[in-house]
Image: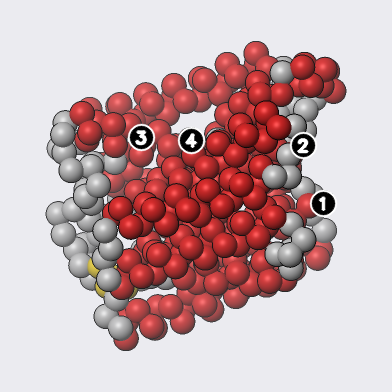
Amino acid sequence: MPWSDPVLLFACAFAVASLILTGVAFLYGRRARLVDEPGERRSHTQTTVRGGGIGIVLTLGLVMLVLRRFIFDPPFAAFAIGVVLVGGIGWVDDHRPLSPRVRLAVHALASLLFAVGLAVTVANTTVAIASGVLAFALCLVLTNVWNFMDGIDGIAASSAVLAVVPAALLAGDYWSLLAVGLAAACIGFLPWNFPRARLFMGDVGSGALGFAVAALAMATVLQLPVPAMLQGQAEESPLFWLARNAILVSLPFAPFLVDASMTLGRRILRREPWWMPHVQHSYQVAARRFGHPRVTLGYVLLAAIGSVGTLWLTWCEEIVSLCSATFWYICLVSIWLVTQRRWAK
C-alpha cells in the first residue's frame, strides 16, 4: 500500500479519535467504579480504571464504517462481526465477570465466522479448507494470548502496532487500511496507558485487539507476495506456501506466542489452575525486576525485529526464510528460559 498524504491523514484522524474516545472511557470507568485493585495476582500497585480498550474498539468500528465493505465482502463482514462479538463479551466481562467457558464459546464463534468468511473467497478448495482451519485457530489463540499478555503498562497496545506492520504494507486492498486504522487506534490509546497507566485496556480491548491482529495476519498470509524465482514451486505445493507464509507473518507476535504458550504449558504440567490470573509470564517476571516501561520497550523491540524479519524473509528462498524463522523462535524460547530461571520467584 503506498504511503501517501491521505493515508497519513487517515491514520492521524483515527489516532486522535481513539485518544478522545479513550478519555471518555476513562471518565465513564471512574464514575462507574470500573477499577482493578492491586493484588498478588496483578502486576500493578495502585487502583486503576479498566475498560479503556473500548476506545480502540469504537475507533476500529469507525474505520470499518468509513471503508464500508460490509455487504460486498464476506471476510470484511465476518471481521466486523467478530470484533463486535469479542469486544462485546469483553465489555460485559469487565463489568460483571463471566465464566471462562462463556467467553471461550463467544471467541470460538467469532473465530469460526471469520474463518468461513475468509475461506469462501479462496478458489482452491484444499487451500480454502486449510486457510479456514488456520484462521479459526489463529483467531481463537491470539484473542486469548493478547488477554494473557495484557498485564503491564503499554505492552498489549504497543506490540499490536508492530504486529500489524506487515499487514499494512503487504495485505493490500482494505486490509492494509484496516491495519493502519488499528495501529492508529492503539497509538491513540497509549498516552493513557504508558509509561504509567492511568487506564487499563480491560478484556474489551485485549480480546478484540488479539482477534483483529489474528484476522489481519491471516489476510496477509493469503496476500503475501511470492518471489518470482519461487512461483513455480508455490503453484505445485500451495499448502507448503500457506504454512510458510503463516510462519513468516507470525514473527512480529512470536514474543507473545512464546511467552503465553510456554507459561501456560508449564502451569498445566504443574496442575495449577491455568485459567486463573497469575504473574508467572516472563514479561511479568521481568517487570518486577526492571519496571514496566523497560520491559514494554523490550517487547516492542522484539516485535519490531519480527516485523522487519517478515518483510525481509518474504522475498528470500524457502530454506533461508524457514531457518531464520526457526532461529527466531529458538531465541525467544531461550529468552523465556533465562528470564524464568534467573528472576522468577
Q: Nearer the viewer, residue 107 or 12?
A: 107
Mark 4 lies on residue: 254
Looking at the image, tell me whether mark 1 or mark 2 is earlier in sequence order.
1
Determine contact: label 4, label 2, CB under 8 Å: no
Tell us which disc is closer to us: 2 or 3: 2
Tell us which disc is closer to us: 1 or 3: 3
Q: Nearer the viewer, residue 112 or 59?
A: 112
Looking at the image, tell me whether mark 1 or mark 3 is earlier in sequence order.
1
- Residue found at the very far right of the displayed protein: 228
Mark 2 lies on residue: 123
**At 43% across and 78% down in the image, what residue appears?**
25
Other-residue count near label 1 (Cα within 10 Å), few / some / many at <14 / 14–19 / ≥20: few
Disc 3 residue type (three-letter): Ser
Q: Nearer the viewer, residue 34 or 77?
A: 77
Mark 1 and mark 4: span between their CA atoms? 27 Å
Instruction: Using residue 268 as the reference point, say whether residue 20 is left or right of it.
Output: right
Disc 2 residue type (three-letter): Ala
Looking at the image, tell me whether mark 4 or mark 2 is earlier in sequence order.
2
Mark 1 lies on residue: 2
As helix, strand or loop, the secondary structure at mark 1 comes to loop
